[in-house]
Amino acid sequence: MNLTPESFQRIVDNLHDGLYLVDRRRVITYWNKAAERISGFTAAEVIGKSCADNVLSHVDGKGCALCAGMCPLAETMCDGRLRQSDIYLHHKDGHRIPVAVRASPLTDAAGNVVGGIELFTDISHRAASELRIQELERLALLDGLTQLANRAYLEREIVSRFEEIRRFADQTFGFLFMDIDHFKAVNDRWGHGVGDEVLKFIGRTLTANARPYDAYGRWGGEEFAGVIRCIGAADLERLGNRLRCLVETAFVVHEGQRISVTISIGATLFRPDDTVASLVRRADDLLYRSKRDGRNRLTLG
């Protein structure tokens, strides 16, 4: 079966996965409809730009920038080998989205590498998050700005975890208490409208990288919290630090400038004698220890 160029483009544009092509200089030459949907960037906004020009800005789980060096696509273009990796891209709205990428070399008739192809799949639990938002709206437990659960919902979630542990003694859960560093300075310099955009991209970063059975919400002001089920201390620390790194590398663009922030985190596990108040108070104390020790860090206790 011979496909016309128009038919081929229709097939590519209707893929579920994002797909883009780059030339030897890693300048984007093609960007399909799924890439637009997943990233928020239209083809017109990215074609002709380098991957690192405020577009995908890939980072790994530790927050290390990939686009400026040897990202999977660049490595594939160098050695011609296929690669797969789970990384995080920058959405146009500012937050970080986990994606599974598959990179392939693009060759000419003689076998010379003339560019690269990358497919990327959104691996966030978007469907579960959307169902949760609908339920929270119904129960008036949604924070209107960030579209996260509000404090009332999080407190109910903690109580539910207490009850779960009473039924299943081998269960535990963790609590992350997060606060934006120097948020007042963002509002003072850029205005509350930009401050709201920062709050929103942090909220989206948390939900895009959440497991379907965990709950994240806005506690109030610039404070966020996460109730993390079935987790031990080491994994809670690792999860919290990954979120911290992803927030650090997320950004919004305002008047041509990148605006980014960091968060400090207090992390703790449930204790048998805990109440909601004691759990939150301990996490709050750990959060402020992170602040005192220099900010943009997690303290576990």
Image: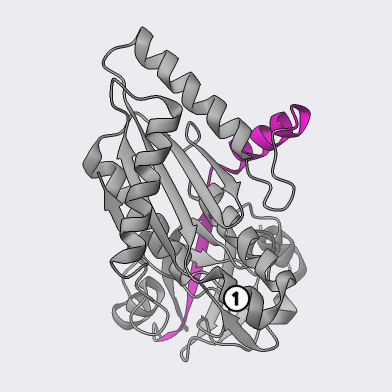
Residue 136 placed where, x, y %? 70, 32
- Number of labels in the image equals 1
Q: Is residue 107 left or right of residue 236?
A: right
Q: Residue at x 74, y 70 (%)?
A: 193
Residue 56 placed where, x, y %? 54, 73
Picture quadrant of residue 264? bottom left
Q: Amino acid at mark 1?
A: Val
Relative height, residue 35 to residue 283 (above, below)? below
Residue lying at the far left of the rendered structure: 234
Residue 20 placed where, x, y %? 58, 71
Residue that mark 1 sits on: 186
Q: Residue at x 41, y 15 (%)?
A: 164
Picture quadrant of residue 191? bottom right
- The reply to whether residue 93 is visible in this rendering is no
Picture quadrant of residue 292? bottom left
Relative height, residue 62 to residue 57 (above, below)? above
Relative height, residue 252 to residue 255 (above, below)? above
Who is closer to the viewer here, 184 or 256? 184
Q: Is residue 297 left or right of residue 234?
A: right
Residue lying at the far bottom of the rendered structure: 25
Q: Is residue 232 left or right of residue 295?
A: left
Asked if the magenta segment contains residue 46, the reply would be: no
Q: Residue at x 49, y 21 (%)?
A: 159
Secondary structure under tag 1 reads helix
Span of residues in magenta = 113-140
Please state, as top left, top right, bottom left or bottom right, where the C terminus lies in the image: top left
Q: Which class describes the residues within 10 Å of circle 1: few (<14), some (14-19), or many (20+)?
A: some
Relative height, residue 176 to residue 291 (above, below)? above
Please state, as top left, top right, bottom left or bottom right, where the N terminus lies in the image: bottom right
